[in-house]
Amino acid sequence: MTDYLTKLFIDGTWQDAAAGETFPVLDPATGLEIARVADANADDMTRAIDGAEAAQPAWAALPALERSKIIRRAAEIARADIQRLAEVMTAEHGKPVAQSIGELNYGLDFLEWFAEEGRRTYGTTVPSTGPDKRITAIRQAAGVSVAITPWNFPSLQILRKLGAALAAGCSMVVKPAALTPISALEIGRFFAEAGLPAGVLQVVTSSKASRVSPTIMADSRVRVLSFTGSTEVGKILMREGAATMKRLSLELGGHAPFIVFDDADVDHALEQLVAVKMRNMGQTCVSANRIFVQRGIAPEFTRRLVERLSAMPIGLGSEEGVEVGPLIEDAAVQKVEAHVADAVASGASVATGGKRPTHESLANGHFYEPTVLTGVTDDMLVARDETFGPVAPIFEFDTEEEVVRRANNSPYGLAAYFFTRDVNRVVRVSEALQYGTVGANDGTISAVQAPFGGVKESGIGREGGHWGMEEYMDTKYISLAGLTRP
């Protein structure tokens, strides 16, 4: 068995859980246990917050240039070890190693971006109301922060929060998903090697959020909470955070429309759709969930999509050439099966896929074939709920006005995509779509320098660019009076 990290990372040391409890981490491709990880409780979380509070003043006071050097050094250490880190991620998550490497590289890009952005947290001098006053506005670290992160991107979702927090001068406690905790512990390791002061980063693993989240939400020392996960949980955190007026940054559920107009570059649209639909086996918040294709090109577009998806190799993420790994757990497969069954029962047809693969080598894993559904209507489950799996439902439409209305008919507003050669339509549709992130002829919208986030029930706040730093900083207004002229 590989020697995985399994202990809590608190105050710069590796520690067992206070109660000595552990929980299993399973390989979703085989169902086998790969490690048992420390199962933290409320006492462990309190110790972590204690350590973060103690480390906070010195870290905030450290010159931004010095903080930047440590963050950059951590990124360099991780890049030198990226193959091993990717294999760890694939073992606990299941995604192909090539995708794990891509995730890590992108996450480390965030560290490097924020290491530089932190050196540019400028203040402002404001014209005063009289000659005896000077007005300035400065930006300071908000204080202790907590990141609660999901399993679908075990490293990326931590690194883009952590990079912003550390660059802003905030200590951070990371509570990773129970399904993928080891990648988070690896982040603790390479930051320790980079010389991050003890207590500035804590990694607290637990089998259930309920073991530690009440402690986080009740503790007034936690000033910032960054959460990526479901809208249902995000709403709970908003209510609980009100008692201590925590600042919340929430990236919640998505239900992205992907619109292809009949004047689009079909080759490009198809390439972008396969990338955004099948990344992470469809288990991303920005995955294309509702694929709207204008009626005149729908048959040809669908035929070509079926050819592409049916040819994608399925297997263990550790095997060379595999493009489709397992879903994270059996409950995820069951949800996909329920969505497909509902669509078929309501009149849709399965053009390819639609079942678990039958190959004996995949029997113990959580696999599902890439699937294309045709004849899909807006009253089916796939039209209303986020599938979070490798299912591409094709919705046909006739007019621009119709498809914009249907695309916006969702409580979610995280990401949307559309493809057209008409520059006037690019402007109209970009502005009409009620989403925080829009890809116009672009399905690969992620960028470290851009403000990623949603509207409506997809969350509040932004990650990336200088906007990401703002989530962890307070603006202080200073009015200096009593100045006299000689």
Image: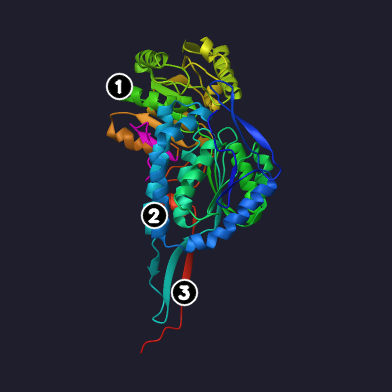
- Which of 100 and 341 lies nearest the eye of the viewer? 100
Does residue 402 appear anywhere in the picture? Answer: no
Q: Main secondary structure of the magenta part?
A: loop
- Identify the residue at horizontal 52%, vertical 27% (top origin): 388
Q: Is residue 299 above or below residue 186?
A: above
Q: Earlier in the sequence, mark 3 or mark 2?
A: 2
Helix, strand or loop under label 1: helix
User: In the image, residue 85 lies at what x, y percent?
Assistant: 45, 35
- Above or below, 358 against 450 in this view is above
Does the stretch in magenta take in 324? Answer: no
> Toward which corner of the image does residue 385 lie, by quadrant?
top right
Q: Looking at the picture, how far across and down is residue 371, in whole percent?
A: 47, 16
Q: Is residue 447 magenta?
A: yes
Q: Is residue 399 left or right of residue 220?
A: left
Is residue 301 or residue 366 the one in the foreground? 366
Q: Do the numbered discs 3 and 1 sit on residues whose CB atoms are within 8 Å?
A: no
Indicate which disc, 3 or 1, sits on the residue closer to the N terminus: 1
Q: Position of residue 345 (x, y in %)?
A: 58, 12
Quadrant location of residue 148?
top right
Residue 348: x and y in percent read 51, 13
Question: Which quadrant of the view contains residue 122?
Answer: bottom left
**The label number, if any, that marks residue 267 in the structure image:** 1
Magenta segment? 436-450
Residue shown at 44%/33% (left/top)? 84
Mark 2 or 1, nearer chain start: 2
Marks 2 and 1, how far apart at CA: 44 Å
Label 3, secondary structure: give it.
strand
Instruction: Tell me if mark 3 has few (under 14), some (14-19) or many (20+) residues whose alpha carbon lies within 10 angstroms of its own.
Output: few
**Label annotation for residue 479:** 3
Q: Nearer the viewer, mark 3 or mark 2?
A: 2
